[in-house]
Image (cartoon, rainbow, N blue to C red):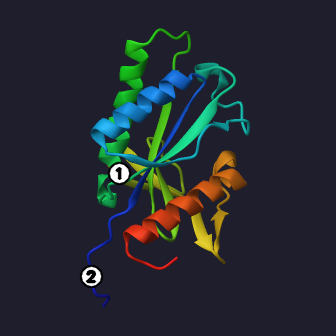
Amino acid sequence: MGEIRPHRHVLPILAAFSRYEAAIDWTRDVVARHWGEIVLDSGPIPFVDTEYYAAEMGADLHKHLFAVQRLIDPADLPQRKRQSNGWETQYLDSHAHREPRPLNLDPGYLTEAKLVLATTKDRDHRIYLSDGIYAEITLFRRGGKWQHREWTYPDYRRAVYHAFFDRCRDYYRQRLGKAQ
């Protein structure tokens, strides 16, 4: 029988994308107020790998990836997804944009070995957590670099994302007191 051990806290990640830089700025403020200081920011990454969101979000989308300083219990992921969905609605209701979804927020977390994202959509490769929220391992580490799965979104396969997650992993390891 395996020994049950306490789990480590994880590094919270948030992907925010929009065509409006003001929406990203608004997100930074909300995250800082509710989740804590953003310690890593990818800067704007053009969202060019799919047209999937164009009808509801418009063209010329940019994604920002954020890492939040305060480590969390991975069991908090469903609550964070529900909260970030509420923030999307709050932004929509308080800003006059013509798109039905001017802001998209996707929370997740990073460990030394993987990037996990939360979603409301069930698929064969996703695990149900609670409160209508599922999780998937989007990227994993092997051979000293990030690897993708067949279901990994195209943008998360890009080198610019992997470089950001390398920075996040280094930060996380530093927080855990591990040598680089």
The x and y percentages for residue 36 are 32, 45
Indicate the amino acid at tag 1: Leu
Mark 1 is surrounded, within 10 Å at the Cα level, by few (under 14), some (14 to 19) or many (20 or more) other residues, namely: many
Give the residue number, with chain letter if any, for mark 1. 77
Residue at 55% x, 25% y: name it: 21
Indicate the amino acid at tag 2: Ile
Residue 148, relative to residue 19: is it above or below? below
- The label on residue 18 is none
Q: Is residue 131 visible?
A: no
Q: Quadrant of residue 64?
A: top right
Q: Quadrant of the N terminus?
A: bottom left
Nearer-the-camera pick, 44 or 81:
44
Nearer-the-camera pick, 152 or 175:
175
**CA–CA distance in space, label 1 to label 2:** 21 Å
Give the residue number, with chain letter if any, for mark 2. 4
Q: Is residue 112 left or right of residue 47?
A: left
Residue 11, relative to residue 86: is it above or below? below
Q: Quadrant of residue 28?
A: top left
The x and y percentages for residue 179 are 48, 79
